[in-house]
Amino acid sequence: MNLKLKTTLAAAAALLASASALADVKIGVTLSLTGPASGLGIPVGNQFKLWPQTIAGEKVQLIILDDASDPGKGVTNARRFVTDDKVDMVFGGSITTVSAAVAPVAAEAKTTQISIAPVGVPPDQERWVFRLPQGFSVMAFPIIEHMKKAGVKTVGFLGYTDAYGESWLKEFIAQGEKAGIKVVAAARFARSDTSVTPQALKLVSANPDAMLVVASGSGAAMPHKTLIERGYKGKVYQTHAAATPDLVRIGGKDVEGGFVVSGPAVVAEQLPDNHPSKAVAVDFVTKFEAAYGKGSRNQFAGHAYDARIMLEKVLPVALKKGKPGTPEFRAALRDAVEGMGRTIFAHGVMNWTPTDHWGYTNETGVMLKVVNGQFVVEK
């Protein structure tokens, strides 16, 4: 083979390799794989392991980093994604505080952020943030409706000191007042706290009709248990961040009879046949539990399942306007997510719009009750 031919072939191979690399869609994922919120992040990471190598005919490269449930580390991960890895999209974080910390980095880089936690951000960042979990107003709605039917008039609030807890308190007070339900006592605690005895004693002494615990994953069991151990006899409600096996595994008999709002994914088989998400939700739990064991299904793993559905719909649209790795493609991805229209997720019907990056409607939330260590849909 002469030198000229060798040079030509080498150049062609380099060009082909470059084109191939350019064709890979890169997604940076920051998860709480360790730290207080690891119970939320690990199931998401497990679901990502079940993703195919190609989505909508495109090779998708996931760059998954642990943020240790720390907003500062989440920012470090996000800066690496947009600066070094040149990702086309960012997923994360697993918790509200990390997602909020990542948002300005993604917005500055004009890169779409798909949050796996419900998060509120300033208007200048909102354009680039879309949420996979249901919003506070959507999930507060079924709790309020359930309380109304149960005759609840007064509520004690026991929740995180961070943005997740405060956002829930604000939304619950607003909806509750319209329904004649009043928060008569409120107490907060940090995610890293190992005891909430003083807070529980304060709330129990107020003797409200019901308690609302706002916590997540394994961290949701401890405050619930403490309320019961301190003699509370009323109804205890939990948010959708608590709809995980950790609540009943750690909470045991103390969480029996507790109420938890959830997306439909974790109770797929219990959904009526006419529920739009039933088939998709059943597919999610069947495949996840085949890989990780019976009972391993998880609210947060469901969000990672839904993320793949989203990509299957938006990638072909965005690829018409740009190539992966370019600003044009990142902008087109954002526009495609915002305009993808009615889409059936395992967690409900999603319809992001230019004025709504939360997407779900009030029909989304499902009220569950803990019965014999299992989540059962409230009729």
Image (spheres, grey):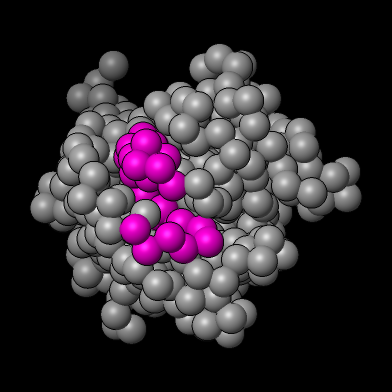
Residue 129: say if magenta: no
Residue at image coords 70%, 32%: 283
Classify residue 273 by image quadrant. top right
Classify residue 251 by image quadrant. top left
**Magenta region:** 205-232
Residue 209: say if magenta: yes
Residue at image coords 49%, 35%: 255
Residue at image coords 18%, 43%: 193
Q: Is residue 356 visible?
A: no
Nearest the eye: 172 or 322: 172
Residue 220 in the image, given as x and y percentages of width and height: 38, 42
Nearest the eye: 8 or 278: 278
Q: Is residue 281 left or right of residue 321?
A: right
Nearest the eye: 7 or 15: 15
Residue 369 in the image, given as x and y percentages of width and height: 63, 42
Residue at image coords 77%, 37%: 270
Q: Is residue 364 visible?
A: yes
Residue 337 in the image, given as x and y percentages of width and height: 53, 65
Q: Is residue 353 left or right of residue 145?
A: left
Above/below status of 231 relative to 175: above
Q: Is residue 104 left or right of residue 42?
A: left
